[in-house]
Amino acid sequence: MNSFNKLNIIKNIKNLDFKAKKSFGQNFLIDNNICSKIASSIPEKFNDTVIEIGPGFGTLTYILAKKFKQVLSIELDNKLYSFVSKKMSDLKNIKFINQDALKVNINDIIFSNFQNFSSVVLCANLPYCITTPVLTKFLKSDLIDYITVMVQKEAAERITAPLGDRSCGAISYFARYYSNPKINFHVSKNCFFPAPKVDSTVISFEKIKNPNCKNEELLFKIIKLAFEKRRKNILNSIFLNFNFKKEFIFEILKKCNLDKNMRAENLKLEDFINISNLISCNF
Ligand code: SAM
């Protein structure tokens, strides 16, 4: 069963008359040690239930099935879905669904596939192109307790960057609002077939209780717009994107003890929360 190396993956690709699709981020792991390291990086206390996105040929899925009581694996590609669900049909603790992970309703798939669960983890070797939408969707979900995903190295560095660091962006604030993000380890592009152009990094997010924010949609809109034009100061960023007088924004910044010339990257998460809470009172 556990025969996932480069030769076997190539054999499967040939037998299935399969062509790896760039648009689905189909770079398959060919190093079992990396799969084991990914699974081991998830703390024991979350060993109950896991959702995997994109099993591919099942390299990581197989190792997750050994660690977790129940596994739900979501594959968008029809051929891979048929292959992997047949190949792993002997393993009774795994279910596969042939859907787009970006379109599933997380509550529905959890309650319709798992009877009892003490915690739910998301684990995936993610297609690079869906990193941000997947993280946005699963970090927001109250049912997800822990996330471990492999993403492009540069994306990992941005997502986990300390707030205030030059490399951080809106996604870094989003991640810190919902979790404690951290880098686990880096993975060379040579551990995949076909090899991607860039190296990867495995990152984890332990969910935290959300800070006290009155309007999350507004908070993330302010942060996103501020980072889209990060050279503008915060006063102008809010002024140009919302229908408020400059004096009003100036008053809000004063109440938050912020200088109007500060830029997005100088603001703490609490600063953005305070600004959005004060603005939301005037909506
Ligand atoms: N887990 C396998 C591995 O590590 O070798 C495959 C990882 S490969 C980087 C990404 C996988 O995600 C592919 O199997 C691809 O078909 C699947 N995929 C791509 N977009 C998806 C989506 N929106 N929903 C579910 N699966 C998706």
Image (cartoon, grey):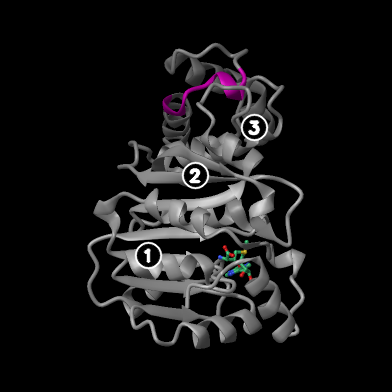
On the picture, is 16 further left or further right than 282? right
What residue is shown with label 3? 227
Q: Which disc number belongs to residue 203?
A: 2
Label 2 is placed on what type of residue? Answer: Ile
Q: Nearer the viewer, residue 39 or 107?
A: 39
Label 3 is placed on what type of residue? Answer: Phe
Q: Across the whole image, how many numbered discs are drawn on residues?
A: 3
Residue drawn at x 59%, y 14% is 260
On the picture, is 264 further left or further right than 197? left
Residue drawn at x 69%, y 78% is 11
- State the CA–CA distance, disc 2 to disc 1: 16 Å
Residue drawn at x 44%, y 36% is 176
Q: Give the structural element (helix, strand or loop) at label 2.
A: strand
Q: Earlier in the sequence, mark 1 or mark 3?
A: 1
Q: Where does the magenta region start and end?
A: 263-270
Circle 3: is it few (<14), some (14-19), or many (20+) Cα within 10 Å? some
What residue is shown with label 1? 50
- State the CA–CA distance, disc 1 to disc 3: 33 Å
Q: Give the structural element (helix, strand or loop) at label 3.
A: helix
Q: Which disc number belongs to residue 18?
A: none
Dominant secondary structure (helix, strand or loop) of the stretch shown in magenta? helix
Q: Do the residues labelled 1 and 3 touch (CB within 8 Å)?
A: no
Q: Which of marks 2 and 1 is nearer the N terminus?
A: 1
Label 1 is placed on what type of residue? Answer: Val
Q: Give the structural element (helix, strand or loop) at label 1.
A: strand
Q: Please check the rendered image and state whether residue 186 is part of the magenta-colored stretch, yes or no.
A: no
Image coordinates for residue 253, horizontal then vertical, percent = 50, 18
Q: Nearer the viewer, residue 250 or 261?
A: 261
